[in-house]
Image (cartoon, coloured by chain):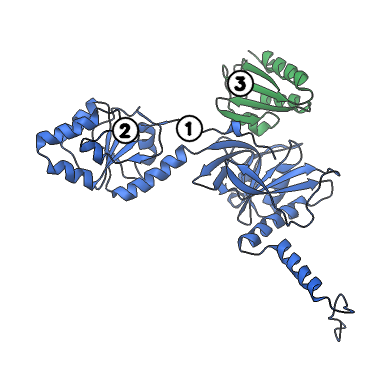
Chain colours: A green, B blue
Amino acid sequence: MVERVIVIKNRTGLHTRPAATLVKTAAAFKSDFYILKDTFEINGKSIIGVMTLAADQGSTLRLKFIGPDEEQAAQAVTELFERGFDEQL
Amino acid sequence: MKIDRQKETRKKSITVGSLYEATNERFKLRTLNGERGFENLIKDKNLHRPGLALAGYVELFTFDRVQIIGNTEIKYLDSLKPDQRRVAFMSLLEFKMPCIILTNNNMLDQELLNTAAAKGIPMFGTPFETTKIAYFLADFLDDQFALQIVLHGSFVDVYGVGVLLAGRSGIGKSEIALDLVERGHRLVADDVVMATRKGEGIVMGSGTDLVKHFMEIRGLGLIDVRSVFGIRAIRFQKRVEVVVEFEDWNPTHDYTRTGLDEETVHILDVELPLVKLPIFPGKNVTVIAEVIALNYLLKHYGYDPAGEFSKRLQGVIGEKKEGQRVIDYFEHDFE
């Protein structure tokens, strides 16, 4: 299992479009992907799940990757958050 | 099906203010000494009647619970002289109680109420009897402090049976749920199911407020089941009664052929029947899901199809008839 803690950078938070990008990126990997916010944990490959988090700018999320390609998945997903989903920061 | 026990959560505390907010209409609560102490925390779902503490015995006094003062306590306080009454009540106020509820429309001297306010202990009055309010409050607090877990799956009411559809991402849970809705069943939640334990042995499932009855269908996007199918297609909560886990067909796995042995899964410490369903293209999973629900109902009403068939077979084997035909009803039936 690989764990990463990230803070949401883009101003509009994890709204529908970034959520879709995130889910698509994660779905390309075999590993299971979970996101934990506060005490609420959801499946990161589910768009409804990601939107349930209603994560705004500054929220801290704990990302968990479990599976054969966990390192690559963690890398790709963390980069996405770092880039602020290519939106205005 | 693997359920990670570590993902179970439980509220640690609620404030007295939120208790009042949520219940004052139903329980007819009214504040007796203002809103001081509304930020006090309730950490225990149990209640306490401080009769013995009023009489001076404060060992084992569970003061951190909601305190209920009923007729007995009031009668006792009334039987005391005013200064003794003050002493008795003041000794109670030494403890940091979250709040005190007076039942049966009972009242205390204004002076005592004010002292409680000064100590930051809010007091409420209610017209209900002690046993009734204790029952209501225990139920409410039990709900508030219930064990919860977020499950990934679709949850549908099929013929009144709460069927939780589980399985890996992308296996088609939402599509099957949509198909069930199309056939007249009711969607509770898709993708994110909040499971809450109710009492002993009951798991309730519901959606989250934010995504209620929205669903993602791959290739289509987000759809709002309530708008598309109307009010008959949804419900807010339902008891989880059967778990159906979809799997990719695995030739080495030993799928049940008779249904004599039931598999189960534990969700929040409650044992639920689990049906593992291999799926492959062309299989009508929706109908199978309906039959699973109906079969559950049959079993619930005391009929076990696998057991019944087995019994019939044993009967036939036991008879050992000679030269028996497999069927015996062709005579004169030429239709």
Q: In the rendered view, does B51 fall on the left or right side of B177?
A: left
Secondary element under disc 1, as helix, strand or loop, is loop
Q: In the rendered view, does B252 fall on the left or right side of B287?
A: right
Query: Please, what is the three-letter code of the amino acid marked with disc 2?
Result: Phe
Task: Residue B287: name its quadrant.
Answer: bottom right
Secondary element under disc 3, as helix, strand or loop, is strand
Whether labels 3 and 2 belong to a single chain: the reply is no
* Observer-nearest of B133 and B226: B133
Which residue in the protein does label 3 denote? Answer: A61
Which residue in the protein does label 2 denote? Answer: B63
Question: Are dots 3 and 2 in contact, CB under 8 Å?
Answer: no
* Observer-nearest of B271 and A74: B271
Q: CA distance from mark 3 to mark 1?
A: 20 Å
Query: Please, what is the three-letter code of the amino acid marked with disc 3?
Result: Leu
* Number of residue marks: 3
What is the chain identity of the residue bearing mark 3? A
Residue A28 coordinates in the image, percent (x, y): 79, 26
Q: In the rendered structure, find residue B19 and report the number of the disc placed on it.
A: none
Q: CA distance from mark 2 to mark 1?
A: 20 Å
